Image: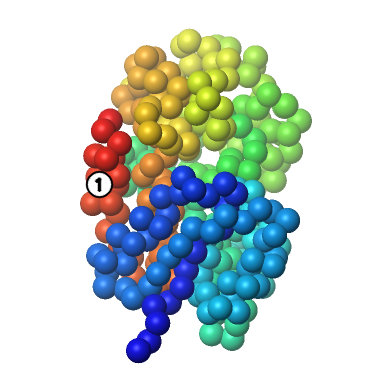
Amino acid sequence: MKQPDRYAVFGHPIGHSKSPRIHGLFARQTGQDLEYSALDVPAEDFDGALDGFLRQGGQGLNCTIPLKELAWRRADRCSERARRAKAVNTLKREADGSLSGDNTDGVGLVRDLCGNLGLDLAGKRVLLLGAGGASRGILQPLLAERPHSLVIANRTVDKGEQLAGEFTELGAVSACGFADLAGRRFDIILNATAASLQGDLPPLPEDILAPGGACYDLAYGTSPTAFVLWGRAHGAAVSADGLGMLVEQAAEAFFIWRGVRPDTAPVIRLLSEERGF
């Protein structure tokens, strides 16, 4: 009897991961025979864990923090979006045994923003909070939507400027410090820091969100994040967290592995209902 194809997510910590549940739902929905597990892998153990997973027949892997850059380095070839991000969250074992790397975070974000939440990024003034790995991973897909401008605000301005400089050929992207946001307004504000999970927020001007604007927190939790609450308090027409992005980026990985695109709507609805908000 043929064994199910093996997939997994590596991360540290990993106990909170919803990925096994999501991919299990995708597999049942699409009739795919696979098993998907979550494995706690610290960065220093990544290479050995990956080699062991492949020896045991692993066909594909997701990688979370802090392993995305390590996965990028191990991939034999990468998609353009992964090359730009310098990070890989999806590895696929090819027929010849080589590893293909991709980064599905940005496309997952854009599909949630535009497909699920009904936003249009074209011509909009976008503010991206934070210049870390999460921001790097989403910049190319965001700029592909042709916003009017995309500003990266970061506590360390030099870091933001360096990141913006790597993507200027793709669109109107720039960087500034939080103090430089005074007097400016944005149609869409994206929080790519994890700070709001601990109730912390950058020092944003009270009038920075344009009327009818939207707020989106890439992080998600069992209750609304501080940034989602900030958006609601400041009149956002849409203020959402990253649960939809999580499901959408997983669906893209599933498609890369299996060649079948699952329906994300019922999965997002189920996980949202279970959170109760």
At label 1, which amino acid type do we have? Answer: Leu
User: Where does residue 102 sit, x and y in percent of width and height?
Assistant: 55, 62
Rendered position, 203 above or below 159: above
Vertical placement of 191 versus 25: above or below? above
Residue 68 lies left or right of residue 209; in this view the side is: right
Question: Does residue 135 lie above or below 8 as drawn?
Answer: above
Residue at 33%, 28% in the rendered image: 238
Q: Image quadrant of residue 43?
A: bottom right
Q: Residue furthest bottom?
A: 1
Pick whichever, 63 or 131, lies toward us: 63
Q: Residue furthest right?
A: 158
136 on left or right of 16: right
Is residue 23 visible from the viewing direction of this image?
yes
Q: Percent position (x, y) of residue 25?
A: 30, 60
- Foreground: 6 or 96? 6
Q: Residue at x 34, y 70 (%)?
A: 260
Mark 1 secondary-structure assignment: helix
Q: Which residue is under mark 1?
A: 270
**Residue 3: where, in percent of width, then height?**
40, 82
The percent coordinates of residue 228 (x first, y second) are 40, 25
Of residues 208 and 131, the one drawn nearer to the viewer in this rendering: 131
Q: Residue at position x 37%, y 29% from top?
A: 223
